[in-house]
Image (cartoon, rainbow, N blue to C red):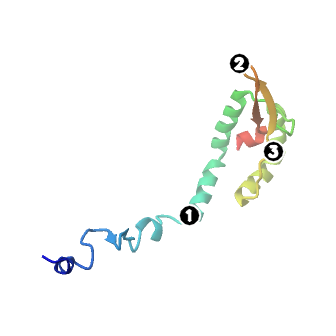
Amino acid sequence: MSMLNAMRQKSAIAERAGVADGEAVRDPVSDEAANPRQDTESTGSALLGTVLTRENLQRAWKRVKANKGAAGVDGLDIEQAARHLVTAWPTIRDQLRRGTYRPSPVRRVTIPKPGGGERELGIPTVTDRLI
């Protein structure tokens, strides 16, 4: 059989599923991309609402307090931060809901390594640890 006859026997389109001109065929519509199950904006708001519930914040506060961490750049230890949050929390909560909250810079300290030398450690503020 000549090469010309052999070429005529091949179909013009590859007969394998999912192949087009040597590349994978795109699905015309993806269920996840085209039809999300829920509105992403309301999902984010609902998640944030759940995170900011009193019960969740109380659990988070217990964990922060149990870790007995040092003060951050604001200089407030756990007890001082607790007193500060009594008045500042409504403002912080509103900033979180609006997406305008910005964490404070992290305090950098160096701690000695067991084998000699030092390593840097970042200490966030107590409020940022709570959030």
Label 3 belongs to which residue?
A: 105
Secondary structure beneath label 1: helix
- The 10 Å Cα crowd at callout 2, few under 14, some 14 to 19, many 20 or more, is few
Label 2 belongs to which residue?
A: 114
Q: Is residue 54 left or right of residue 18?
A: right
Tell us which disc is closer to us: 2 or 3: 2
- Towards the viewer: 101 or 59: 101
Instruction: Give whichever of discs 2 and 3 has the lower sequence position.
Output: 3
- The 10 Å Cα crowd at callout 3, few under 14, some 14 to 19, many 20 or more, is some
Q: Is residue 113 left or right of residue 43?
A: right
Q: Quadrant of the N terminus?
A: bottom left
Label 1 belongs to which residue?
A: 40
Secondary structure beneath label 2: loop
Tell us which disc is closer to us: 1 or 3: 3
How far across and how far down the image is residue 129, in percent? Answer: 72, 39
Q: Quadrant of the C terminus?
A: top right
Mark 1–mark 3 CB contact (< 8 Å): no
Q: Residue furthest left?
A: 1
The amino acid at mark 3 is: Pro
Mark 2–mark 3 CB contact (< 8 Å): no
Query: What mark, if any, has residue 29 been given in the picture?
Result: none
The amino acid at mark 2 is: Pro
Q: Quadrant of residue 111?
A: top right
Name the residue rendered at 56%, 60% in the picture. Answer: 43
- Towards the viewer: 58 or 1: 1
Secondary structure beneath label 3: loop
The CA distance from mark 2 to mark 3 is: 27 Å
